[in-house]
Image: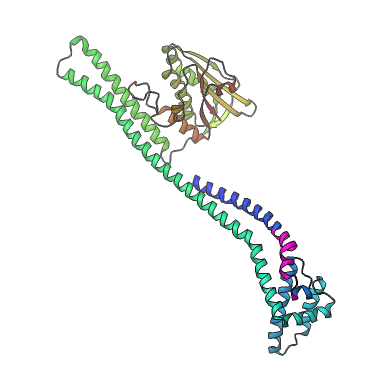
Amino acid sequence: MGSEKQIKSFILSRFYMVFAVVSVVELFVVFLTNTLLIPWLIRNTPVELLMQIDKVENLFLVFFVMAATAIVNNILPIFKVSPVEVNQFLAKLLADHGIAKGNTDDANTIIEVFSSDTKSVVTLLLSVFLIALVLILPYIIGGILYSVAVARRIRKLEREKEEARINDEKRRYLMISNIVHDLKTPMTTVYGYAKALNDGIVPADKQPEYHEAIMAKTERMNEIALLLLDYVKLDSEGFTIKKERIDICELVRSCCALCYTDVESAGDEIDIDIPEKPLLISADSVQLKRVITNLIMNAIRHNPDGTKIGVFLKCESMSTAEDIRIFVADSGPVIPSPLCEQIFEPFVTGDESRTSGSGTGLGLAISARICEMHEFDLKLVQKPEIFRYHLDDAYRKVFVVAM
């Protein structure tokens, strides 16, 4: 659908551009034809001696009169109708436009003389043909250039579409590989511990430790499965968000309260600045809460202990609740350029070996998808661009949700 809109937009914009250029060129061509080409074509010919032709309109009018005269003189006598009145009307037409050198009677005489002069007729026909060709040449060239440009654009979009399809397939294969990898590690651990317990090689005092490890790894597998289910559900056809009027300030405060114990456990510091006045927006409270919670938990999990975390809500117009932005900032290290460009892709984490267990790489992908469904914008901003938000100098990166 996106590529079709691009093609329609390109076709319209390029058409208007080509039409404007061709119109300007056509005016220039008409000027040159009137001042140079027509005088050169009819100079020292019977046409010049009999008629005053100084512009394109006059030349085509003469051609029309001569063609009409020939038709009238050959057809009307068949029906026993005199062509005299018609010829006089045509002659008057030339005289009124100042083409015939004389009055109407002279014009009538000129038409008869001109029609009987083969050289004059041939010259007129060749002149009309050549000038018509010159006049339509800008449109022919414009049409060719327009067609070539549209064809190239379509081929480019088709290539991009094919590349996107190939990349989607690669991402799907990579996703399957990552799922297997993330599940294989805890499953291997669970199997090893369970086999050791089953074989009776674990001392009695160590068995509780093994049981706890099995429970922890099982919980990890369950977390991965649930996150994957959520991601697939959000991306599935037919899933819709349920919007309602909610107080975004209260929602962000509840997310901060929910994550507060995790912040304390990590030894982090959290700074919260949320307006006291309610700001009502239309959103799915359950899904939007997941976004804010994911961003806060992401700052806790992927930064060193003792990191400063900031959660702020700013609004340009408190009375109309417009231009609301939620900031989740932290003082942790910046994300390297190759990674930050793919940070919202599924299964992208800061750990290339994927063995740290710090995350599945689905949290930000889910958050981005939820924001997209709300028509919100979620982006990562790091130093030095972060300074434009006028946050504390301690913060080095921030996730911004623009509503």
> Residue 94's quadrant in the figure?
bottom right
Question: Image point 82% across, 72% down: which residue?
Answer: 96
Q: Position of residue 300 (x, y in %)?
A: 44, 18
Please state which of residues 152 and 196 is positioned toward the viewer in this rendering: 152
Q: Residue 153, can we see it?
A: yes
Q: Is residue 51 above or below residue 219?
A: below
Please state which of residues 139 and 231 is positioned toward the viewer in this rendering: 139
Question: Image point 65% across, 27% down: which residue?
Answer: 319
Please state which of residues 74 and 237 is positioned toward the viewer in this rendering: 74
Q: Position of residue 353 (x, y in %)?
A: 33, 24
> Residue 290's quadrant in the figure?
top left
Question: What span is in magenta?
Answer: 29-46
Decide whether residue 33 is among the magenta residues.
yes
Image side of residue 367 versus residue 10, left or right? left
Q: Position of residue 164 (x, y in %)?
A: 43, 42
So how many labels did they put on this image? 0
Q: Is residue 56 above or below residue 368?
A: below
Q: For the stretch drawn in magenta, what is the main secondary structure?
A: helix
- Where, quadrant-wise, is the C terminus in this rendering? top right
Question: Image point 35% across, 34% down: which residue?
Answer: 175
Image side of residue 155 versus residue 44, left or right? left
Q: Which residue extends farthest top?
A: 205
Q: Residue 86, can we see it?
A: no
Decide whether residue 392 is among the magenta residues.
no
Question: Image point 14% across, 19% down: which residue?
Answer: 199
Q: Position of residue 112 (x, y in %)?
A: 76, 82
